[in-house]
Image (spheres, rainbow, N blue to C red):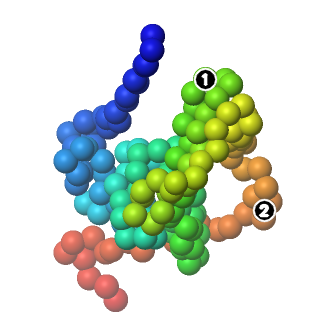
Amino acid sequence: SDATVWTAGFAVSPIAAAGGLEVTESGRIVVDRTMRSVSHPDVYAIGDSAHAIGDNGRPLPMSCASAGYTGRQAIEAIVGRLTGRTIANTKLVYTYNHISLGRRDAILQGVDDEGRAKPTYMSGRKTARIKAGILSMSLWATSNPTYGMPTRRHRLAAAHASPPVGSRSA
């Protein structure tokens, strides 16, 4: 063809809304800074399913780049809450668009704090290799989630149980 235009959209599973979680119009789970559902504190959401506000005050877009940051933040929060440690804030940013166009071509273009594409970009085979490397690292990291973590174990924080209703404390 003389020109081919391909577009794609993102869709979130309706399961979160059906389960009663607070979601946006698009079905993304509304989370706090630690990726914890604002309506159900025992639920964490990351990646495309999370409506997370980035460090620039704007919602992070649905992308694999956002998934990495929200995943790290959720891990910090869950581990912090289970061990009684302070929850570290990881950065929540979206700095570039990276689009694969097959094995031999890709586009890498930075974005500003408003999410607008910057005028300069990289493309071509080298950019496609960078994208392939990012995907390979992501797959490897998923398969090796404890790589580089300290071997020392942290004790879980004791749960603060409330006395049963109607009981007296001494």
Mark 2: secondary structure: loop
Q: Residue 71: give x, y in percent of width and height.
A: 53, 53
Q: Are marks 1 and 2 in contact (CB under 8 Å)?
A: no
Residue occupied by mark 1: 102
Q: Residues within 10 Å of mark 2 (few under 14, many from 20)?
A: few
Q: Is residue 37 above or below residue 6?
A: below
Q: Residue furthest front?
A: 2
- Residue located 69% across and 38% down the image: 127
Give the side of residue 75 with respect to residue 170, left or right: right
- Residue located 52% across and 47% down the image: 97
Q: Nearer the viewer, residue 56 or 87?
A: 56
Q: Residue 114: give x, y in percent of width and height.
A: 40, 64
Q: Is residue 11 above or below residue 44?
A: above
Q: Residue furthest top?
A: 1
Mark 1: secondary structure: loop
Viewer can see residue 114 = yes
State the quadrant of the N terminus: top left
Amino acid carrying label 1: it is Gly
- Residue located 25% across and 60% down the image: 39
Q: Quadrant of residue 126?
A: top right
Q: Residue 159: give x, y in percent of width and height.
A: 46, 69
Q: Is residue 48 above or below residue 11?
A: below
Residue occupied by mark 2: 150
Q: Quadrant of residue 26?
A: top left
- Residue located 24% across and 51% down the image: 23
